[in-house]
Amino acid sequence: MTLLNTALLLAQALVYFGVMAALFRGRARFGLGAFLCALGVMHFLETYLASVFYIELPFGIISPGSTVLFSGKLAIILMLYIREDAAVVRQPIYGLLIGNFLMVALVMILRYHEVVSAVPGRLPNFEFVDEMGWLMVWGTTLLFIDSIAMILLYERLGTWLQRWPVVRSLITLSVILSIDQAGFFLALHYVSGAPWYVMFGGWCAKMGAAIVYSLLVGAYLRWFEVRTEPAPVPMRLTDVFQALTYRERYEHLLARSGRDILTGAYDRGRLDAGGAAIVDTALQAGRPISMIIIDLDGFKIINDRFGHTKGDDVLRTIAQTIAESLRKQDHLFRYGGDEFVILSDGLAHGSAFVLGERLRRAVELVTAKEPGGPITVSVGVATCPLDALTVDRLFTVTDERLYIAKHAGRNRVIGRDTSLGGNDALDK
């Protein structure tokens, strides 16, 4: 029986992650709404199963709601952060938190109704609703804390585990799930009288879930979120009319042109030709858009000491590292010999500053063992409409902040608040 239970848990994890990953993968076509709604819908079932539904495994008694659904939710939120940013991650968390508090508030009002029995023998069980409501509020509060801690820990581990995302995810999920198991079980024990041995069994199961979901997140990011040109696929019937329009042919041609041969990033001509349209579209839609300019510190020394061939290899490595850290809607341009420009649609200034700091650390880490390394970068950050209303003015402001970073000692990020510049900007 325990073997069957284990197999069923694994099947549930695969189905849950598979569907959520498919919705996330389709965000470019359908938006994030479908993905976020599916994530929120599962919250009641997750809490209900965690409070009343238990099964036996070789190491103890556990609940699939906590093991599969909550652990999976944290893994999905981590994946959302890796491919998007913290501003996107907070949307489902705030929605769940406010929604659960709203449910408790409404139930408090509902209990004052004079209830009639329209269906014989069936009346509302407010005791059950109260129990589930407060458990959901507590669980979502923990999720809020867990998510912040998870993002901070994941970023810290990047200093040592930048090239091992599965290990990085595993350590992050294991630590956060351990803390959460203790926090949620205390509420579960108080509200529903769950026995203490359930806590140990649940912890063991969550460690197993951390392994499974880390492997699934790693596989998804490796095989489904790779930033390469899409391979040609056979045309489907539903694509025929779109494929025959001049607009689609033009966009396809445009996507394949304007690339820097060495790094694969868009070239300066593409920024000059399309940058204004990207900025104008974002402003018209009411979205912020940030520009990040990255300039390599002292890169000429690499070419002089080790030759241009080695310098080209290092540039390719740096460009790939930057690209892998960006979201799907970010645009990366190679502006000059050792200068890169990023346009981040929908990214507010604070998030753009954090992204700039993350890129600074990533470049320094990936070039640590290169000849002449580690290579540092200076970064300037500016945002529309906060700092400018046109792409030309945005570039001017961003370039001025890059200049400040260079003359303040290099290897730092300068944004609107220049007091944040420095190697330890995120710690201030």
Image (cartoon, rainbow, N blue to C red):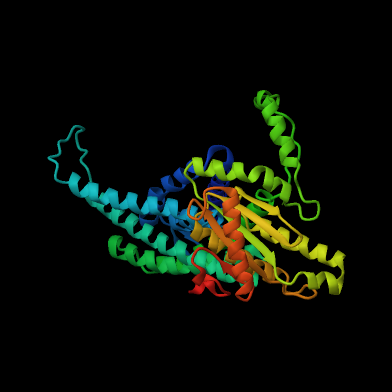
Q: Examine the image and state in which quarter residue 298 appears.
A: bottom right
Identify the residue at image location x=49%, y=46%. Answer: 287
274 left or right, relative to 85: right
Q: Is residue 178 visible?
A: yes
* Relative height, residue 177 to residue 330 (above, below): below
Q: In the rendering, at what x and y percent does residue 424 appear? A: 55, 75
Picture layout, residue 85 above or below residue 156: above
User: Where does residue 273 sit, x and y in percent of width and height?
Assistant: 68, 43
In the rendered image of this protein, does residue 23 appear above or below residue 76? above
Residue 284, given in percent of the width and then of the height, sits at: 50, 40
Q: Out of 332 and 393, give the one closest to the viewer.
A: 393
Q: Residue furthest left?
A: 114
| Relative image position of residue 113 (x, y in whole percent) | 14, 41
Nearer the observer, 274 or 167: 274
The answer to whether 241 appears left or right of 196 in the picture is: right
| Residue shown at the point (64%, 71%) measured from the top left | 406
Give 1 or 228, whichever is nearer the viewer. 228
- Residue drawn at x 71%, y 61% is 339
The quarter holding residue 307 reads bottom right
Residue 83 visible here: no
Q: Tell me if 319 is positioned left or right of 156 in this view.
A: right
How many numbered markers are drawn? 0
